[in-house]
Image: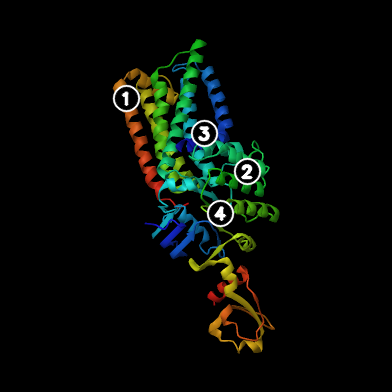
Amino acid sequence: MKDMANAIEIKNLVKSYDDFTLSIESLDIPKGCIMGLVGSNGAGKSTMIKSILDLIRTESGEITVNGESNKIPAVREDIGVVFDEIKFPQIFTAGDVRTVLKGVYKNWDDALYDQYIGQFKLPLKKKIKEFSRGMKMKLSLAAALAHHPKLLILDEATSGIDPVVRDEILDIFLDFIQDEEHTILASSHIISDIEKAADYVTFINNGRIVFCEEKDALMEKYRIVKCGNEELDAINAADIVGRRTNTFGAELLMLSEKVPEGFVSAKAGIEDIMLMIIKNEGR
Amino acid sequence: MMKGIITKDLLGLRQVALTMGLLMVFYLFLGFMGMNSSGGGMGYLSVMALVINVMVPLSCAGYDEQCGWDQFGASLPVSRKQIVICRYIVNLLVIAFTTLVMLAGNILFAAFGGEASGIAAYLLPIVFSLIYIAIMIPIIYQFGVQKSRFIVIAVMILPSMLIAAFGMLMANSGSEDSFLLTGIIDSLSALSAVPVATGVTVAAVCFYALSILVSIRIYSKKNF
């Protein structure tokens, strides 16, 4: 019996390419949260999302979505997906998208779709090829939400979009997540979006999960210690999670409880944590 | 659920609507001009039907590839099997449409004193289209439109050469018409071979059905 408290459960997932392997031993994404998926290009974020959506054939692993195997097409009735680009032919209009998806989803809601189209100020009869990137993204989002999904998956959906539109989209996410049965899994390069909206953060590097933690706990867990070169010797090297050095000294990423007394430390942002860990793993 | 996928393909056909329309006008004109020749104007309409029937699946796949639809389609609550079946249904709908255009053209030619054509004139493009499509779609699914372009051209040239050879053979054995497809139509009509025509049609339909199975197998293994 699967844990129905989780929107997504991944066990022993392995997907290999010629030069890269995604390997996830275990990952649970609880219902009712926004899970931010971060990592550098090629780290495995999209591969993980594609695996969840059953878009790629994996070597091994079991994935469940809302308690059901992701291999069952009907499971996707409850999933809304927004990719980095709109995937409809360029000659389509927002009206065409409605006609098509109405014939696909059992729970398609014309009124809700029209509400989003109105809210986003999108024209119904204009061809997609004449849309700006922001408009295309809003259309993708309207299409992803109009069948009342329980899980919204976004793969780099906010990249290349100006901050005003990103903020507008983040508001939609926060509205969507008001229902505790709703969950969002969003991969993004834009860490500020994740910092603003996510409840949990999963960090992937080189195809492996480095951590999956509650955002607030994560930001409490690490500190940035700034010190001069001479002070570096006083710190146990094993306690340093990551570092950024310059001519005058270094910025060290350390677990909060490992920060030595007398050292000045500051709150670590997700970007600091991510970059310093990547740098450290690359050593 | 399949309704939405079929609708998407049909709406997507607007991208080739102008080309299809021009082809129809062009061949209807040629057919009208040649309706009093041996075989009537139906030879031209048969070529029109064949060209459109073969062009559509290639165009559909090309546009899908261009906009990344395959990835989005696979994320919808439809199985890959259903997606493949939809593509084959759309092609059947296109064949039905071009057959109706041929029928309309035949009626038009007859109304203007042309020679009305028999069932072979309709059957031939349908049979050839079914075989063409049955070969093309699995190749496109396997290699993608860009990579399979040359294979598809080869697949199209080879049967054309066979048709040419068959047409010339038939023409030499009695038919005076040098126009290949018309020659074949004449020859088939002359044979009045209902069992042969039925056999060929059934074989083409079976080949089409077999192609669906092959395509499902290929498409199910694809990574998007």
User: Amino acid type of disc 4?
Assistant: Leu
Q: Are marks 1 and 3 in contact (CB under 8 Å)?
A: no
- Based on the displayed image, in which of its 4 quarters is residue A263 positioned? bottom right
Query: Residue A77 — which label?
Result: none
Q: Are marks 2 and 1 in contact (CB under 8 Å)?
A: no
Report whether mark 4 lies on the same chain as mark 2.
yes
- Please state the chain letter of the residue tagged with numbered disc 4 in the rendered image: A
Q: Which mark is nearer the camera, 1 or 3?
A: 3
**Residue A202: x %, y % from top left:** 53, 64
Residue that numbered label 1 is attached to = B198
Residue that numbered label 2 is attached to = A116
**Mark 1 to mark 4: distance in Å?**
52 Å
Q: Which mark is nearer the camera, 1 or 4?
A: 4
Residue that numbered label 3 is attached to = B10
**Mark 4 to mark 3: distance in Å?**
28 Å
Residue that numbered label 4 is attached to = A154
Q: Are marks 4 and 2 in contact (CB under 8 Å)?
A: no
- Is A221 placed left or right of A167 in the picture? left
